[in-house]
Image (cartoon, helix red, strand yellow):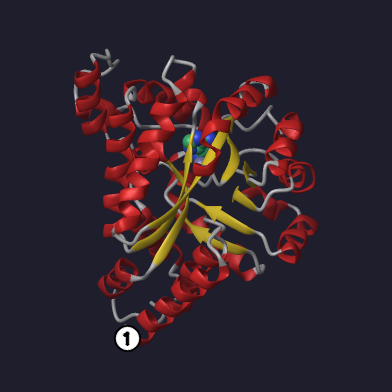
Amino acid sequence: MTGFASRDERAAFIAGLPKAELHLHIEGSLEPEMMFALAQRGNVKLAFDSVEAIRAAYEFANLQDFLDIYYQGMAVLLTEQDFFDLTAAYLTRAAADAVRHVEIFFDPQGHTARGVPMANVIGGIARALAEAEERGVTSRLILCFLRHLSEDDAQATLDAALPFLPLIHGVGLDSSEVGHPPEKFARVFARARDLGLKIVAHAGEEGPPDYVWQALDVLKVDRIDHGNRALEDAALVSRIVTDGLTLTVCPLSNLKLCVVDDLTRHPLRRMLQAGLKATVNSDDPAYFGGYVNANFLAVADALDLTREEIVTLARNSFTGSFLPLAQQAAHLAAIEAYAAGH
Ligand code: ADE
Ligand code: ZN
């Protein structure tokens, strides 16, 4: 155990370490208890008859297995209040993990396709984010396009989001990766860039290194979500290092979705050693068994991460964020002060 007297000491260090979370699908923070409560409130029929039955169904062989259940779960989200309650619950959990800044994904097409107005979705999420800001947790909102749907559908979704543009900081790309390369969405991402939005994309989670190249060269991403399979291509790694792009890595997600067969073989340390700016994130914490500190702890235990590596991951979470540099600097100073005192 490098830099810590015990596992408990490492856990305590992680628990209080100031950090940002940059890869969190708000619909993936829907805990089974809230799913049940919202189903009752909205009179929605669930395929499961208990919280235990829901949790028992969370065994996934791959990304698609998970997505099938994830889209079913979000059917309980109907009203502005539902989206507010979901987001407020996540922000409470995040604050308990010493998260000072969050960049949250949402999947509007998972809701508008069911007849839920965009105003309910963005209104509820944004109201919870504004309340959290008063308690000192800052945020950015990132609208994701579902890549298993058409580019025309993504364009219509961007149209529907235009009235809410001041609340949206960036666009992303998620859902079933293999068979849906970034180039399928070249035009809608070009339009988003012209609107001044930041660009991120899930790439190299299950998809090949070529999809990561496309995210860089076609979508012109500001950050890469996951990026695990970039390590298969040395030229791609150098390109990401040269461009200084951050990877939002999600250890427990990778384990639950069989992207890695064991956390002791997780590529996080190799990413850091290659000079990649990796961060640790929870992805869909209600489905994958833990929020951000649980992700830090699980991967730190499995790889025996050093104190310095853990601090680097926390620093990367702020330097890879879309916060202005002055705010990043204040968070970096808080990390140094915390590390000096612990
Ligand atoms: N949507 C929610 N979580 C996702 C993930 N890990 N990959 C792709 N799409 C997602
Ligand atoms: Zn994700």
Q: Residue 197, percent across and down?
A: 63, 45
Rendered-image quadrant of the C terminus = bottom left
* Residue nearest the viewer, comparing 155 with 296: 155
**Residue farthest to the bottom, as pictured:** 340
Q: Relative to 64, is 23 above or below?
A: below
> On the rendered structure, is 281 left or right of 127?
right
Q: Residue 224, percent across and down?
A: 63, 50
* Residue nearest the viewer, comparing 276 with 131: 131
Rendered-image quadrant of the N terminus = bottom left
Q: Residue 292, percent across and down?
A: 38, 55
Q: Residue 111, percent across and down?
A: 44, 22
Q: Is mark 1 within 8 Å of ligand 2?
A: no
Q: Relative to 203, is 16 above or below?
A: below
- Which residue is tagged 1? 341
The crowd level at tag 1 (other Cα within 10 Å; few <14, some 14-19, many 20+) is few
Residue at point 72% right, 36% down? 191
Q: Relative to 96, is 184 above or below?
A: above
Residue at point 41% right, 41% down? 284
- Is residue 58 something one can see in this rendering? yes
Residue at point 27% right, 27% down? 54
> On the rendered structure, is 189 left or right of 4?
right
Going by the numbered disc 1, the residue's amino acid type is Gly
